Amino acid sequence: MSSTSIDSLLHENRRFAPEPAFTAQANATAELYEEAKADRLRFWARQASELLSWHTPFTQTLDWSNPPFARWFHDGRINVAYNCLDRHVEAGNGDRVALYFEGEPGDSRAITYAELTAEVKKAANVLAGLGIGQGDRVALYMPMIPEAVIAMLAIARLGAIHSVVFGGFAAESLRARIDDAEAKLVITADGGYRKGTVFNLKNAVDAALASGAESIQNVLVVRRGENEVDWSEGRDLWWHELMAEAEPEHEAEGFEAENPLFILYTSGTTGKPKGILHTSGGYLTQAAFTHKNVFDLKPESDVYWCTADVGWITGHSYVVYGPLANGATQVIYEGTPDTPHPGRWWEIIEKYGVTLFYTAPTAIRSFMKIGREVPNQYNLATLRVLGSVGEPINPEAWVWYRQVIGGGRTPIVDTWWQTETGAMMISALPGVTTAKPGSAQVPLPGISVDVLDEQGAHVGKEAGGLLVVTEPWPSMLRGIWGDDQRFVDTYWSAFEGKYFAGDGAHLDEDGDVWLLGRVDDVMNVSGHRLSTMEIESALVSHELVAEAAVVGANDETTGQAVVAFVILRQRMVGSVTDEEAEAQLRAHVAEQIGAIARPRKVFIVAELPKTRSGKIMRRLLRDIAEGREVGDTTTLTDTNVVASISASFR
Ligand code: ATP
Ligand code: MG
């Protein structure tokens, strides 16, 4: 084994074959892989023509003459908002519900495609009246309410560029993103609901504008929280006042397929956020294709729910663009999973008869921590496909998800992708793939990936290395806003002509892909390169444990030593002392993986430091474990967590 590959020591042998009844009705078929393999570009051209409506059809599929700067379908013209709205109304589906909005305090609204189209037309007129046109940047800083979706689509309709900044970020993060994109307008709300209280977004906008963000000309404010806000006459405008006066008609113009659609800053798990740029035709093609096939969407009968906030890429591709391009009916929910009670999500699934559900491993593990008694109180029998995204899902969490939420019946799709990839890249197809818990498995039809060692050689089967994408794909990022060199350096210089994703992966004996987490998080213990992910999965497979984070801390004898931070399942708290738990867990890891992976130390903690999108920030734990000053915490949800863990560490 080469010294640069990653050792994979965890063995997971459970298999879940598709139900024949599911396969018989599935959108996806094994032929899709054959078709894409025979002619990848022709396959994507067919998807683009069949799934979307073009103002001017394209004749060129891919221009890769200036790599890594790709142009897809570039001589075609398209309007993204028209594809998500008007065409469904024109096809006679105006009465179909597009959004079932559920507010945290319990208020709800159903908005049909006809209503959503009408709102977006008015909003486009409002924005045009404020001087927004093709290429202008508009920042959004909003709660998860229908106006966030309406604003995004209105911006897209004008050929302008949105930059959504998650509403949980502080003023300084908002200011930095506005400045980087030189946005002209910011759309916000007076406040939004979170954990039972109103958080004041407008204050943060005011603070951002007081300390910079000089490109901003106006602040458009949606009324949601009904809280007191300061008002700057002339600069600040109420959304509802302008909407009441807006012209109702707005004709969607076709823009070049490569017209920029949005900038989205990565979540900052590994360092300074990058402004990832996405464009129109290729992005929408892959968002629509994957949403239809990976969720087996039947727009006439399904009720889809993705729990992501629009502030993340998942909210862009799988709340706004994919589902709406496909004419889906979906739920959007403003608040947190446990407000006002821990069964809130399951109550929403029961209320709307949700059939397709997409969430993140961090949420699943937090429900595991509380226990199955809570979801068991609700009728979840309508569910037919469950999805996971954001981090590797530990096999034990996968099985819990399928048993407890999916009634032991539903296919699970573990979807690997990134802000940069724009849409899903590696996932099982329900009805086609025999599922393996913990593995994202196979590249989607039309997507080509490989796992390489540091010299760029294919690692072969049953070996680990670095995940790369070997061919351009329609929804690929087109660059980093304002920094072409950083784009080339970050993603395209590790391996000539290949996209380096920054994640480690292992190929099993079938050639299926198992994600091992970020390359930055790989540890080196006595010359073995170990994945944090596998040791965490071993810990989570112990009955005491709900969630675990593992880091490699400097060690004089072994190079690095495994240090684990563990959250216990609620019903186990108090059943053992910390010392007993530590001894059991060290032995368990040694038995599951091998003595090499046995943690030097296991800390029992109440919380783990996470980014606002719910990902564990291992670099902070590494700082703690090595007794260093803790690094940049601006994207951390709760800085107290670090303080409390640091205290217990000493
Ligand atoms: P930053 O790049 O700023 O550090 P980030 O990588 O967390 O932030 P995202 O683009 O939201 O921002 O996340 C993409 C990353 O999430 C992937 O590179 C991978 O590490 C992880 N990921 C997403 N889905 C999966 C999955 N199904 N399995 C394993 N890992 C996943
Ligand atoms: Mg990333």
Image: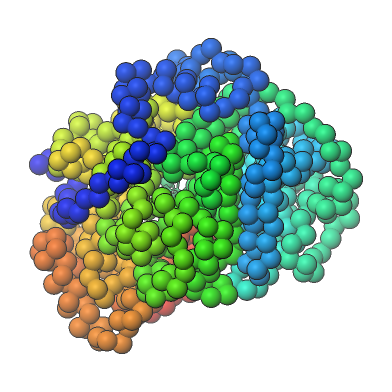
Name the residue nearer the viewer: 429 or 263. 429
| Residue 416 pos. (x, y %) | 37, 44
Left or right: 566, with 49 as reference point: left
* Residue 216 seen in the current view: yes
Q: Position of residue 259 (x, y in %)?
A: 62, 27
Q: Is residue 191 above or below residue 490?
A: below
Q: Quadrant of residue 327?
A: top right
Report the side of 623 relative to 597 (left or right).
right
Q: Residue at x 20, y 41 (%)?
A: 507
- Viewer can see residue 135: no
Residue placed furthest toward the top:
59
Q: How is the image coloured?
A: rainbow
Name the spot of residue 134 as percent of width and height, x first.
Answer: 71, 29
Count of numbered labels shown in the rendering: 0
Q: Quadrant of residue 231?
A: bottom right
Q: Is residue 270 left or right of residue 392?
A: right
Placement of 313 over or under 406, stated as above or below: above
Q: Quadrant of the N terminus?
A: top left
Q: Quadrant of the C terminus?
A: bottom left
Say above or below: 602 vs 190: below
Q: Residue at 47% across / 33% down in the picture?
A: 289
Q: Position of residue 92 (x, y in %)?
A: 68, 34
Residue at the spot 17% in from the left edge and 78% down from the top edge: 583
In which quadrant of the rendered view does residue 546 lie?
bottom left
Q: Nearer the viewer, residue 408 or 586?
A: 408
Above or below: residue 198 compared with residue 41: below
User: Which residue: 53% across, 28% down?
Assistant: 51
